[in-house]
Image (tube, rainbow, N blue to C red):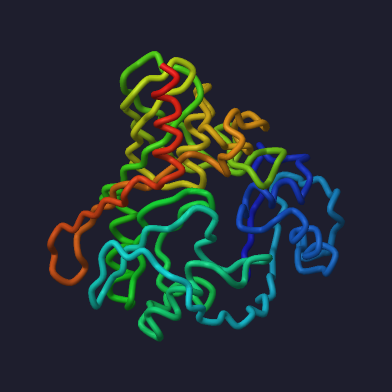
Amino acid sequence: MSRSFIIKKENNSVRIDRFLADACPELSRSRIQKLIKDNCITVNEKPVKSNYRLLTDDKVSLSIPDLKEPDILPEDIPLDILYEDEDVIIVNKPKGMVVHPAPGHYSGTLVNALLYHCKDQLSGINGDLRPGIVHRIDMDTTGSLIVCKNDLAHQSLSEQLKEHSIHRIYIAIVHGNLKEDEGTINAPIGRHPIDRKKMSVHAKVSRHAVTHYKVLERFGDYTYIQCKLETGRTHQIRVHMASIGHPLVGDAVYGPKKCPFPHLVGQTLHAKTLGFIHPRTGEYIEVNAPIPKYFSNLLNTLRNKI
């Protein structure tokens, strides 16, 4: 893969590794530094070091070698299927399951389970590591996720995601008592300027992001809410709610490091409703993933404290 950038005035004197971390969020800082060391990144066709400070009108060129992808094997992992036909399958993803293979997670993922269940009937648009996957939810987020069995369905669903026409409702429990019964957070999201594993509303390079929230129940120090996604950025609900001072309960990345409920693992976020236009029939399909036990148990604990 090759990419190039012409440096604008606002990035004058910025370190090249910092610039590329913002411009290419799919690349980790360590990968960028290795690419620089291997002379895969040049400035004005000359190799530079990681601490090189860019000048206006510099031409930065990247020549990124393809990574050798490991073989991903089918695994007989039970799936909670909410809907399935010849084109799509909607699963209720459990807490703790990674959606697709990545470094450190080449087995036990949803893709491993789908390869076993669907055999060779998964779209190939996203490559060998992400067959059928058109959107993701975080490892510790539960709920509905759609997977495509062929390229026709994948292209249709990708376009619906791009147009923000897929109906997605999440439920969550957040810290604090929201002042308003409902509201909208319109704040662009990009890679955190310091911690590259996090996202932020204060990123230099960001993308449009909108979340609509509505209070379902109040518990004094905590609030049960519904979130409707207008866009689908990485960690969007987690980042947006934290940005207004109401991080998700259990979210140690964007909220308190110590969870007030010791048996809770990860954020209380559930992808409840998923609605879309079927790629073949044109009919509107909507599914609702039942509230998982960890979530309902916490709701009952909070209700009993009132």
Residue at the bottom extreme, as displayed: 120
Residue at x 53%, y 67% (from the top left corner): 109
Residue at x 40%, y 31% (from the top left corner): 300
The answer to which of 188 and 146 lies nearer the viewer is: 146
Residue 185 position in % (x across, y down)? 41, 29
User: How many numbered tags mark residues here?
Assistant: 0
Residue 164 position in % (x across, y down)? 30, 49
Quadrant for the C terminus, please: top left
Residue 27 position in % (x across, y down)? 66, 58
Asked whether residue 166 is in view, the answer is no
The answer to which of 168 and 53 lies nearer the viewer is: 168
Quarter-of-image position of residue 90: bottom left
Residue at x 37%, y 58% (from the top left corner): 92
- 296 relative to 44 in the view: left or right: left
Asked whether residue 69 is in view, the answer is yes
Quadrant for the N terminus, please: bottom right
Quarter-of-image position of residue 40: bottom right
Residue at the front extreme, as displayed: 304
Residue 181 position in % (x across, y down)? 31, 19
Residue at x 70%, y 41% (from the top left corner): 195
In the depicted structure, whether residue 60 falls above or below residue 182:
below
The answer to which of 239 and 297 lies nearer the viewer is: 297
In the depicted structure, whether residue 209 falls above or below residue 282:
above
- 272 relative to 67 in the view: left or right: left
